[in-house]
Image (spheres, rainbow, N blue to C red):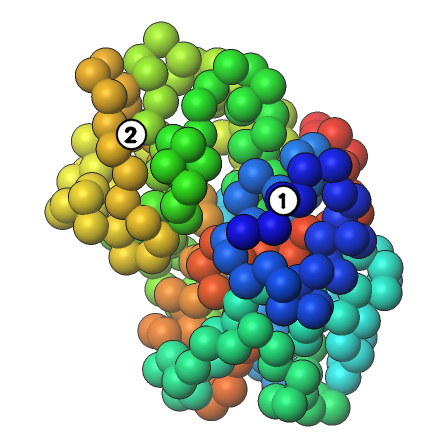
Amino acid sequence: MINTEGLSPAQVRELIREEKITVPTSGMCPGYAQANLVILPKEYAYDFLLFAERNPKPCPILEVSDEGSRYLKKIAPGADIAKDIPKYRIYENGVMTGEYTDVSSFWRDDLVSFLIGCSFSFESELIEAGIEMRHNTLGCNVPMYLTNIPCENAGIFHGNMVVSMRPIPYEQVVKSVTVTAAIPRVHGAPVHIGDPSVIGISDIGKPDFGDPVTFKPGEVPVFWACGVTPQAAVMATKPPFVITHAPGHMLITDVKNVELKG
C-alpha cells in the first residue's frame, strides 16, 4: 500500500494512472473533493442529466465532459477520465461485465462523462470535527446499501436511492448532520438516521456495495445519499453500454471541500 500522505491530488492521480494505486480512495488527499463517475453514450446523456437534476441529493453534478473527450477541464484540469480512477466497472444492458483499472481501450467518440459529488469529500470535515470514520479505522471500503427510497424518474432512468452508512456515537449525531449539511454539493445532510429497516435495509451487516463495519455501544447508523445511485439506475434501466467507477474508487479532484460549501 503506497503512503499518499502529503501528496497533491495530481500526484495521487498520477500514481493511479500508473496503476500503483488500485484501492478505495477514502482518506486520500484530505480536504479535497472526490467524485463518482458515470460515462454513457450521448444518446442517453440528456436523460441522465435530467435524472441528476431531479435527484440532487444522490447525484450532485460537479462537471460534465465534452462529447468524446477523456480530459476534464474544471474539477481536475487535464485528468484522463479513462485512467485516473483506481477501478472502473462496465455495464452492458444493465449487467456488470467487468472491472478494470484502465478503460481507454473501451473509449468511444460518442461518450459523455458525468462527475458526481462523493461523500468521501465530507469525511475529512467529520474527522476534523472529532468524528471517527470507522471504515478508515478498519482499512476497508464504506458500506453502501440499496434502499426503498424512490428516485424521481427522468427519461429512461429510474430506480431507488443508494446510501452510504457510518456508525456515529449518539452524542455526535447532531454535529455530523450540521457538518455535512454545509456541503450540499457532496450529498449534504443525511437522508436517514437510525432503524435501517425503515429504508428497506434488512441486514446492516450485509451491504450491497463496500464492506461491513463494526458498531460500538451507543452508536447509531447514519445514512447519506450515495453517488452509487446511478449504478442502481443503470442496473434498473439497462442501457446498452455504461462505464462507472467501482464503488469506493473515486476521482480525486483539485477542488477543495471548502469551495463546495454553501
Can you tell which mark lies on residue 221? 2
Q: Nearer the viewer, mark 2 or mark 1?
A: 1
Q: Relative to the observer, which residue lies in front, 94 or 15? A: 15
Report helix, strand or loop for mark 2. strand
Residue 124: tell me if it is visible: yes
Picture coordinates of residue 218 (x, y %)?
A: 23, 14
Disc 2 to disc 1: CB gap under 8 Å: no
Dot 2 crowding, Cα within 10 Å, few <14, some 14–19, many 20+: some
Q: Residue at x 24, y 21 (%)?
A: 216
Instruction: Measure the alpha-carbon separation of dots 2 and 1.
Output: 30 Å
Query: Is 147 situated left or right of 21 in this image?
Result: left
For the image, the number of numbered tags is: 2
Q: Of residues 213 and 223, which is closer to you in this image? A: 213
Tell me which residue sits at (29%, 38%) in the image: 213
Determine which quarter of the picture holds residue 127. top right
- Element at badge 1? loop
Amino acid tagged 2: Pro
The residue that appears at 26% across and 51% down in the rendered structure is 207
Residue type marked 1? Asn
| Earlier-in-chain disc, 2 versus 1 | 1
- The circle on residue 3 is 1
Q: Residues within 10 Å of mark 1 (few under 14, many from 20)?
A: few
Give x and y (percent) for residue 237: 39, 77
Image quarter in which the C terminus is found: top right
Up/down of 91 relative to 1, above or below = below
Considering only vertical position in the picture, is 143 above or below 234? above
Residue 34, numbered label: none
